[in-house]
Amino acid sequence: MPAPVDLGPAEATRVVTRVLAPLAAQGAIVRRPRMTAWAERHQTDRTARAVLMRLRARHHGAPLALRLGTRRLVVVTEPDDVRRVLDGTPEPFTPATKEKRAALAHFQPEGLLISSAADRARRRPFNEAVLQADQPVHGDAEPMVRAVERAAATLASAIRGTGRLDATTFADTWWQIVLEVTLGPRARADQELVDALGVLRGDANWSYLHPRRRELCRWLHHRIESYATTAEPGSLVAAAHDRDPDTAPGQVPHWLFAFDAAGAATLRALAVVQARPGERDRVLAGAEAEAGGEGPALLPYGRACVLESLRLWPTTLAVLRDSTRPTTWGGRTLPAGTGFAVVSAFFHRDPERLEHADAWAPEAWLDGRNDADWGLVPFSGGPASCPGRNLVLLVASHLLARLAAQDLRTERGEHLARDPLPATVDHLGLRFRLGAPWA
């Protein structure tokens, strides 16, 4: 394992301006529409990949160390290094990085990701139990899938009325599902909660550079607590309240935040599926084959399509860790507080490792190839991997299957109908038309 190499001024500038700055500009906590559109126009992920590939070759796979003000950041370039960082979480590589703590404290000050070691020891098992991290199909899947069915039927009716589907309309439907799954049917139309969360997430994009709206954060917490104390059976907050009523409200904001990213992945997956008739047929055939069984279907191919969307266009732009103590790496000792970054778009599209780097290949999630690759981290990895992975994939795959049944055409679908696929796709700019192809 080579020691981290200190980048010279010119190399460090390229990493900052062509890799890190475009990621930050788009918004780590909630996407900024103008910047995501800009990123697609300039295909910023393709540029970032090229920069990191050249530096990896020049420095023989060594991690790349650079200074960001008073901070030292190490950008890893090999899957084995990803494994070491993620497997070493939360000690000696904590997910509660300085920037992440400042950002997430805007709306989830008690969230698992930014918890101390002592709080994490209590909150992690709580999250795993409520989200049923080890179960492919959640025990409350039936009401969850019913929520998807209701929202999808309403959306289908709207599509038939207007003949169109855009990202805003999709997002409204997605939030109805997320609120019902998380907080219960009473919450499905709680736009005030969604708006408050959106304001706080917008502030969180600026991390410690933006003052905190403590009153609004308290309002959000109390609103969630009101659903928890009168929880409706089958909702996540009901299970959370039954397990630990004191811990429950502080964890819910992160579930809502994480679900939002899954919506972006589902919309991108839908765009590819509707641009490729063969893929649409496979999604529908998979849903049909699973229908009629006991309980909600697993939908393996639909899940694989959502995972493939997350591989090609990661919603977690970079996985970050901070070292909690001095760390020896390849003979070099790095001080405590060193930051480590896994740039997802680089590893997920690495042509030196992946034959299908720029191709649509859901089957690689079914045959085990992608799960065996430590460079592919759509839900992070190691002890801090997302405990909601299976739950998110359940909800997303069921919505994907129902929307795939609509006769939609993807705007600019020619860019998604064949490989290689674009490196950057702005999900906020996706649009569909019912029936007739786009002129």
Image (cartoon, rainbow, N blue to C red):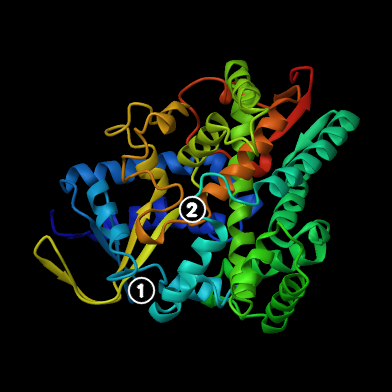
Q: Residues within 10 Å of mark 1 (few under 14, many from 20)?
A: few
Q: Amino acid at mark 2?
A: Thr
Dot 1: what SS?
Answer: loop
User: Which residue occupies the foreground of this view, 220 or 342?
Assistant: 220
User: Going 23% across and 49% down the picture, which residue do you hit?
Assistant: 80
Rendered image quadrant of residue 166? top right
Can you give x and y, in whole percent of width and height, for residue 358 in the image? 42, 29
Rendered image quadrant of residue 373? top left
Which mark, residue 372? none
- Tell me the quadrant of the picture where the C terminus can be found: top right
- Sequence-first disc among 2 and 1: 1
Query: Would you name the residue on which mark 2 appears?
Result: 316
Rendered image quadrant of residue 218? bottom right
On screen, 226 above or below 18? below
Residue 165 left/right relative to 319: right
User: Going 40% across and 61% down the picture, which residue do you hit?
Assistant: 384
User: Going 42% across and 39% down the picture, which residue do you hit?
Assistant: 46
Can you give x and y, in whole percent of width and height, for residue 118 in the image? 40, 81
User: Which residue occupies the foreground of this view, 367 or 104?
Assistant: 367
Farthest front residue?
294
Q: Tell whether label 1 touches label 2 (CB within 8 Å).
A: no
Residue 53 left/right relative to 376: left
Report the label total.
2
Kindly report which numbered mark, 2 or 1, lies closer to the viewer in this rendering: 2
Is residue 211 in view? yes
Cα distance in 3D space between marks 2 and 1 = 23 Å
Query: Would you name the residue on which mark 1 appears?
Result: 69
On screen, 171 above or below 418? below
Is residue 426 in view? no
User: Which residue occupies the foreground of this view, 71 or 373?
Assistant: 373
